[in-house]
Amino acid sequence: QVQLTESGGGLVQPGKSLRLSCVASGFPFITYNMRWYRQAPGKEREWVAGITSADPNPLYGNPLYGESFAGRFTMTRDNARNTVYLQMNNLKVEDTAVYLCNAYNWQNDYWGQGTQVTVSS
């Protein structure tokens, strides 16, 4: 059973931080590329960050970010825990969205259900 489970969202004030987690199960995590997306009501889904597969990839370990997120958000992966993280700092009201975890390779494309992040005073 393939599963991607996001957690760590919540309600925070502008300027605060959250750390999102995505735990993978049911597939060989280390062979998959991982991405974070977000989707706000009435808006298209937006790519946030990604890290490539490590099986094999000499560029593994170098996350890429959308231009709106570099410098505030940090993505990491922990293959021993089958988990990816998204550290979000200095949150803004416009960061409010459902944050979605994605695992993909040349053959498969898996998605979690998302975790809600709400930034409000």
Image (tube, helix red, strand yellow):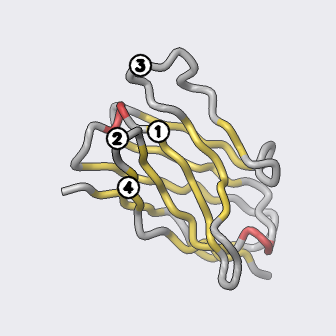
- Going from the N terminus, do you reach mark 1 or mark 3 first? 1
Q: Which residue is mark 2?
A: 82
Does dot 3 land on a helix, a strand or a loop?
loop
Identify the residue shown where x is 42% and y is 48%: 103
- Going from the N terminus, do you reach mark 2 or mark 4 first? 2
The amino acid beneath tag 1 is: Asn
- Going from the N terminus, do you reach mark 1 or mark 2 first? 1
Spot occupied by residue 2 in the image (x, y as percentages of width and height):
25, 55
The amino acid beneath tag 3 is: Pro
Identify the residue shown where x is 63% and y is 76%: 11
Q: Which residue is mark 1?
A: 33
The amino acid beneath tag 2 is: Asn
Image-based side of 100 in relation to 91, left or right: left
- Going from the N terminus, do you reach mark 3 or mark 4 first? 3
Image-based side of 27 in relation to 19, left or right: left
Q: Which residue is mark 3?
A: 56
Quadrant of the image occupied by residue 79: top left
